[in-house]
C-alpha cells in the first residue's frame, strides 16, 4: 500500500534506511582505523591512519545527525540535510586527496593508478550527493512532507 505523500515513506524511507546502513559502516570504519593506528609501521602510515580515523569519526557523527534531521517535519529540513550531505562530500574529498598526496606525491607513480585507486570513492560520493540532492530538490513527497523542497 502506498502511503500518502505527506507521510514519511517511499524514496524518503529508502534514503533513511541507507543512512542507517552508512552509520553502521562508518562505525565499523572507526574500529578498523583505530586498529590501523596501533599497527602503523611508520610515521607516514600513522598520519594516514590518523586522518582516516578522524574522517570516520566525523562521518559517523554526521550520519547520526542526518538520521535525526531527515525525520524532522520542518521547512528547514531539506536545506539542512543538503548542507550536511555537502559537508560529508567535502570532508571526504579533502581527506582522500590528502591521503593520495601523502602516499603518491613523493613517488613517481603513474597518475592513472591514483585515479583508479581513489576515483571510485570520489565518483561514488558525487553520484550519491547528486541523486539525493536532486531528490530533495524536486520530490513531491519531500515537498509534501517537509512543506518545501531544498533550494
Image (spheres, rainbow, N blue to C red):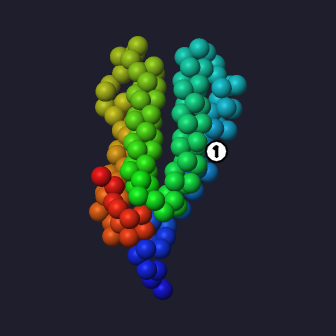
Indicate left or right for 145 with 35 as reference: left
Q: Position of residue 110 (x, y in %)?
A: 32, 25
Indicate left or right for 40 with 95 as reference: right
Q: Position of residue 27 (x, y in %)?
A: 63, 44
Q: Position of residue 134 (x, y in %)?
A: 31, 57
Q: Is residue 6 above or below residue 149?
A: below
Residue drawn at 35 percent across, 66 percent down: 143
Q: Is residue 142 above or below residue 40?
A: below
Q: Examine the image and state in which quarter residue 10 appears.
A: bottom left
Q: Position of residue 112 (x, y in %)?
A: 31, 31
Q: Examine the image and state in which quarter residue 135 appears.
A: bottom left
In the foreground, 140 or 117? 140
Label 1: how many residues lie within 10 Å, few (<14), some (14-19) or many (20+)? Answer: some
Q: Is residue 38 above or below residue 32?
A: above
Residue drawn at 34 percent across, 55 percent down: 150
Q: Is residue 45 visible?
A: no
Q: Is residue 9 above or below residue 81?
A: below
Indicate left or right for 145 with 49 as reference: left
- The residue where tag 1 is placed is 28
Q: Secondary structure at mark 1?
A: helix
Q: Examine the image and state in which quarter residue 39 appears.
A: top right
Residue drawn at 29 percent across, 63 percent down: 138
In the foreground, 86 or 75? 75
Residue drawn at 49 percent across, 67 percent down: 13
Q: Is residue 114 visible?
A: yes
Indicate left or right for 44 with 111 as reference: right
Amino acid at each position: 500500500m502506498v502511503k500518502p505523500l505527506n507521510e514519511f515513506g517511499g524514496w524518503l524511507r529508502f534514503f533513511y534506511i541507507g543512512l542507517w546502513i552508512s552509520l553502521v559502516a562508518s562505525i565499523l570504519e572507526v574500529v578498523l582505523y583505530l586498529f590501523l593506528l596501533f599497527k602503523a609501521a611508520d610515521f607516514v602510515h600513522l598520519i594516514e591512519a590518523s586522518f582516516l580515523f578522524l574522517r570516520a569519526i566525523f562521518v559517523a557523527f554526521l550520519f547520526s545527525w542526518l538520521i535525526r534531521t531527515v525525520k524532522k517535519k520542518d521547512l528547514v529540513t531539506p536545506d539542512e540535510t543538503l548542507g550536511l550531505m555537502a559537508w560529508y562530500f567535502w570532508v571526504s574529498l579533502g581527506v582522500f586527496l590528502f591521503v593520495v598526496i601523502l602516499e603518491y606525491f613523493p613517488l613517481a607513480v603513474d597518475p592513472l593508478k591514483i585515479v583508479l585507486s581513489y576515483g571510485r570513492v570520489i565518483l561514488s560520493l558525487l553520484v550519491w550527493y547528486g541523486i539525493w540532492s536532486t531528490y530533495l530538490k524536486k520530490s513531491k513527497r519531500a515537498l509534501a512532507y517537509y512543506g518545501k523542497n531544498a533550494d
